[in-house]
Amino acid sequence: MAAGLKDKVAGEISSLGFKPRLDVVLVGENPASKVYVKMKNIACEKVGIESVKHSLPDTTTQEELLSLVSKLNADPAVDGVLVQLPLPKQIAESAVIKAIDPAKDVDGFHPVNMGLLLSGQPGLTPSTPTGVIAMLDSINFNYNGAKAVVVGRSNIVGKPLAIMLLQRNCTVTVCHSKTKNLPEETRQADLLIAAAGKPKLITADMVKEDAVVIDVGINRTDSGLCGDVDFDAVKEKASAISPVPGGVGPMTVASLMRNTLEAAKERRK
Ligand code: NAD
């Protein structure tokens, strides 16, 4: 699915007459962030987006980062600006997100883009939830009146996904670390989204027969990468389920490519 999405983006780019440009800023040496940036870079190359990486040291101050962001905002050659999160603790992520030009905010985290999403208007939407919706669309999931349970309420996954599902007429419940009886909530779900960052949090007894289960979690354990869902047991109950790795991750990268193309088209028209 992700390859198909990227092929479509590549096809559109080849007929554009220009190459969109995505600038990715990496601060520090977080190993997971380095992997994500590399994957984004490979995807850019594949679809025909020019990708420029800015690597800054761990000791970068907020002012230094904000100054780079404002330089990229002002550069007419730059279509998308992505600052890889998390940032070192001397830098306030919210200040950096707010500083990115909303028209170049291909991560869709800027309050303006979040506000557009919340009010149902077109704008750049966060890549991970957008990738999840693309997965559900591809299986013709019937959103209308479906009971969706989203486990996790972060600004980058849980909250925007809950809004997207609500706009598609799901009845949405958002669960989080203070939810009183998680299994009672998840067992009601026709569509269960796990985005908590807790290895195998969702066990088979927490899943309704024939539910659609999407696992957003990426957890590094001693036995390798795993999601938030106990895949082997839950796949016996679910009517459709996404694996980790190889599920939402590649769809997120593909959605980022789509966002960069859309940002480039919108800004240059
Ligand atoms: P986060 O830490 O910001 O948020 C986690 C959320 O889960 C919080 O709202 C918290 O209240 C909730 N939570 C934690 N423990 C819980 C529990 N026991 N029961 C119910 N809710 C609980 O994380 P995030 O940035 O939203 O990411 C979530 C997971 O998704 C992580 O594993 C992350 O690595 C992964 N992720 C994957 C992709 C991708 O491309 N596949 C993208 C972003 C995040």
Image (cartoon, rainbow, N blue to C red):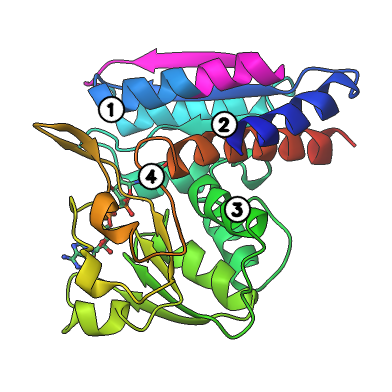
Picture residue at 8% right of the left edge, 31% below the top: 222
* Amino acid at dot 4: Pro
- Neighbourhood count class around disc 3 (C-alpha, 10 Å): few under 14, some 14–19, many 20 upward: many
* Amino acid at dot 2: Val
Q: Residues in magenta?
A: 40-59
* Disc 1 Cβ-to-ligand 1 distance below 8 Å: yes
Q: Is residue 1 above or below residue 171?
A: above
Which of disc 2 and disc 4 is earlier in sequence?
A: 2
Picture residue at 57% right of the left edge, 31% below the top: 81
Residue 198 placement, left or right of 248: left
**Residue 243, numbered circle:** 4
Quadrant of residue 195 within the rendered picture: bottom left
Name the element at disc 2.
strand
Q: Which residue is mark 2?
A: 81
- Disc 2 to disc 1, C-alpha distance: 19 Å
Name the element at disc 4.
loop
**Frontmost residue, 252 versus 153:** 252
Which of disc 3 and disc 4 is earlier in sequence?
A: 3
Verify CB contact (< 8 Å) between mark 1 and mark 4: no
- Neighbourhood count class around disc 2 (C-alpha, 10 Å): few under 14, some 14–19, many 20 upward: many
Query: In this view of the protein, can residue 127 be seen by the observer?
Result: yes
Figure label count: 4
**Frontmost residue, 88 versus 129:** 129
Query: Going by the picture, which residue comes out furthest to the left?
Result: 222
Picture residue at 62% right of the left edge, 13% below the top: 45
- Disc 4 to disc 2, C-alpha distance: 29 Å
Name the element at disc 1.
helix
- Disc 4 to disc 3, C-alpha distance: 23 Å
Q: Is residue 141 above or below residue 263?
A: below
Quadrant of residue 29 within the rendered picture: top left
Residue 231 placement, left or right of 36: left
